[in-house]
Amino acid sequence: MAYFIDVILPIPIEKSFTYSITKAEADFLQMGMRVAVPFGKSKIYTGIVYKIHTQEPLVYEAKDIHQILDEIPIVTQKQLKHWEWISEYYMCSIGEIMRAALPNAFILESETVISKNNDTLLDDSELKDDEFLVFEALHHQTSLKIQDIMGILDKKNVLPVIKRLLERNAIAVQEEVYEKYKPKLVRFVKLHSAYTSQEKLQQLMEDLGNAPKQRDVVMALFSISAKTKKPIKLSDLSEESNASAAIIKTLIDKGILEEYHLQKDRIQYSGEDNEDSKHLNEHQEKALAEIKTSFETQNVVLLRGVTSSGKTEIYVKLIEDVITTGKQVLYLLPEIALTTQLVTRLQTYFGEQVSVFHSRYSSHERVEVWFNVLNNESKAQIILGARSSIFLPFQDLGLIIVDEEHESSFKQFDPAPRYHARDAAIVLAHLFKANTLLGSATPSLESYYNTQQNKYGLVEIKYRFNEVLMPEIELVDLADKYKRKRMKGHFSDRLLEEMNEALQEDHQIILFQNRRGFSPIVECNTCGHSPQCPNCDVSLTYHQYRNQLRCHYCGYNAAMLLNCQACGSNELDSKGFGTEQIEEEVKVLFPDHKVARMDLDTTRGKYGFEKIITAFEQDEIDILVGTQMLTKGLDFRNVKLVGIMNADNLLNFPDFRAHERSFQLMLQVSGRAGRTEKRGKVLIQSYNPYHRILQQVSMNDYPEMYKEQMEERYNYKYPPLFRLIKITLKHKDYNKVSVGADWFAKSLRQFFKSNVLGPEFPPVSRIRNQYLINILVKIPPQQSLSKTKEAIAKINNSFFSIRDFRAIRVILNVDNY
Ligand code: ADP
Ligand code: ZN
Ligand code: ZN
């Protein structure tokens, strides 16, 4: 009898590919093992065994595999099931999921580039002959393609050799440069080496005679160092000497003290002394009990707890319960919220049982976590990770927590699989009969809708921990302030008053300015009105090259206006203002205070994000200007005031979710104010203070926001009531892509009638010389999702059978919002 395997290849082909194997191989192989296989004329790929059978393929002759790469499966059956679901739901190939799911080092192929790992010291004599040849070659060339290695070794079956070298850590697979995740950096100080001699030191103390505070600091440094004989933390020095961070900073600036950073785990790691989790207060206890009751009948529960209500401590209790039964826990977070703040917090409770999984991890580190999870090791019992950690090979998952479940970064937009990690996580939990807890202060409409439909359970906490009051929110009318000349730059007199007060009381301030403020929306300088699409619930975008206003959902367009439709003013402005400008203004307005900025630009470098957060935590920054990065679950103790510079460019963003997102964002930023005893204050500047969303934000009225937005969604046929599939066509020829899109849309209309929008060029319609054009399919609640996808897939197939269209790329995005 002949034996065959179906293999998943990491490429976007629709089906798995069949190879021929021997009887012995058939006996050995299991689903989920890797094999090296030839593909096309000369390519080699790593594939995953998907099925073992005896049916010869009909249309092609099955080739032999090159080699078996694993002794045990590295991908579990449950994962393969999960991949199947993702592939079907998100309309992508299983190979695309394989590529997203596996660490790079698992997918060796002819194009893979490898290089020597200089961190490893290796004894050449340990290497087998073929390994040595490759290693040797890498002395002369910094990197080699696997193809080249086939030449060097003069054989095709080279992947096992590479694999062995990888396992020895002798070589590394080249990849984008990953920034390794580093635990929190703690700041230390010491006396500058220039003052180590007795003489110099005496001189220094004399010099500091008229600066008694600085002198005290240096004295304190000596006394601590005499006592502990250990490195001295900046915070300890500050405490011991009773000196402010500013005084110590002066000494550092003068070069008297020297600062340096050490990783937290290096200095205080002791493995055992985990803290006990906290005693919950009555609201938390009640919520925890309700969650548990709810889990008896529901697999998914949404915890809506206001900011700072102590949701994390509730998660901790649930995690404790699950890990005592030996099961695994996945704690999902948006990438950006995966800060040391939270990691440290969980490590104090669970110590070594927490593993962090992160796209910034190197491939090597990811492989390590992969195997720890696969082998159900105790050090990976709790996985804290971003989106892609849903792809880990869990053995016995007991609970998934999706924190900040409303965050849009859980959705992957490019490349395929275009999955939503929250939704894919729920399916994953189902496969294990495990529970999922979604948490947020401002849930997404779709999750809240699911609770209202009784698909998910709902548990709420309405009080902040320690009975701290929710911050007081005040709306400032920009139109009025401009008219009465009460503005300095972008700052109203009210905001300046509050800032002065906060600074006098030594509190910190956060100023929020949306990065998206740069999107080309037209806004009236006099009344703040911005022109809306008559067919959709979105603002029109300004297209400079055609001098037009366009709706990028339905294609509605109009010539650019000369006067404001609302007030007639001719001061129409299409510019936004950004964080940088705000920072500049603050420097001028508050020259005596320290300002810093946190946005994509300032956090790009290594530890950029961590450094700013740490500096802010340690009170070295008085005023922090930032974008939505500031919203992600950060816990700052001393922030009293939050200023939202301009709410309108959030509200007017051309997207059907703009209002929902504005609500979430503003409440999340507000949540950073007054997290301890003092009640915080939030000032929101807007041309439109009577906007319903702003009223709802100021009342913290989620139910009202939900009700109103759902009506809008109903009227305009948007999620969560309707579903959306976005189809994007891409080609470098404008005409070709237009004609193709027309054909595609026309075919879709035969099935879906008026529920097809477009084709429409997006505001940025040419990217890297490729024109993009979008078609949107809206799927009514009663219409079958699977039938809809079938029809779309069929049309897609016919599309590619037309010769002229073959070169056009078609991108399907299910739930594209
Ligand atoms: P959320 O995630 O709901 O915004 P957190 O879990 O961050 O709230 O809690 C807010 C603050 O209150 C944190 O500093 C946390 O340490 C503290 N806290 C919460 N619950 C407790 C508790 N039961 N005992 C002591 N401190 C708590
Ligand atoms: Zn429109
Ligand atoms: Zn106007």
Image (cartoon, rainbow, N blue to C red):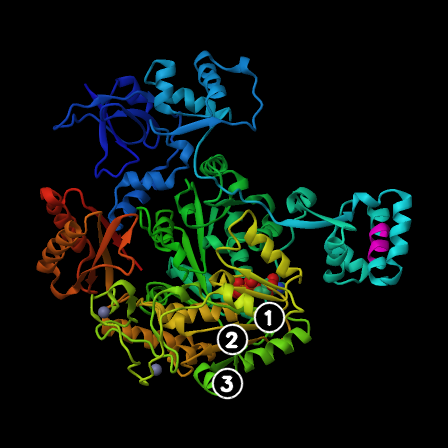
State the residue at coordinates (22%, 57%). 774
Can residue 681 be seen by looking at this rendering? yes
Instruction: Check disc 3 and give the amino acid type.
Output: Lys
Is label 1 in a helix, a strand or a loop?
A: helix
- CA separation in Å, label 3 and label 1: 19 Å
In percent of width and height, residue 568 lies at 31, 85
Per the image, the residue denoted by label 3 is: 485
Cα–Cα span, label 3 and label 2: 11 Å
CA distance for labels 2 and 1: 10 Å
Disc 2 target residue: 489
Occupied quadrant, residue 673: bottom right
Looking at the rendered structure, the kind of residue marked 2 is Gly
Residue at position x 85%, y 50% in the image: 222
Asked which secondary structure carries label 3, the reply is loop
Quarter containing the C terminus: bottom left
Identity, as a three-letter code, of the amino acid under mark 1: Val
Query: Residues in magenta?
Result: 217-223
Q: Is residue 733 left or right of residue 751?
A: right
Asked if the residue under mark 1 is in contact with the one under mark 2, i.e. CB atoms within 8 Å, the reply is yes
Taking the image as four quarters, which one is ligand 1 found in? Answer: bottom right
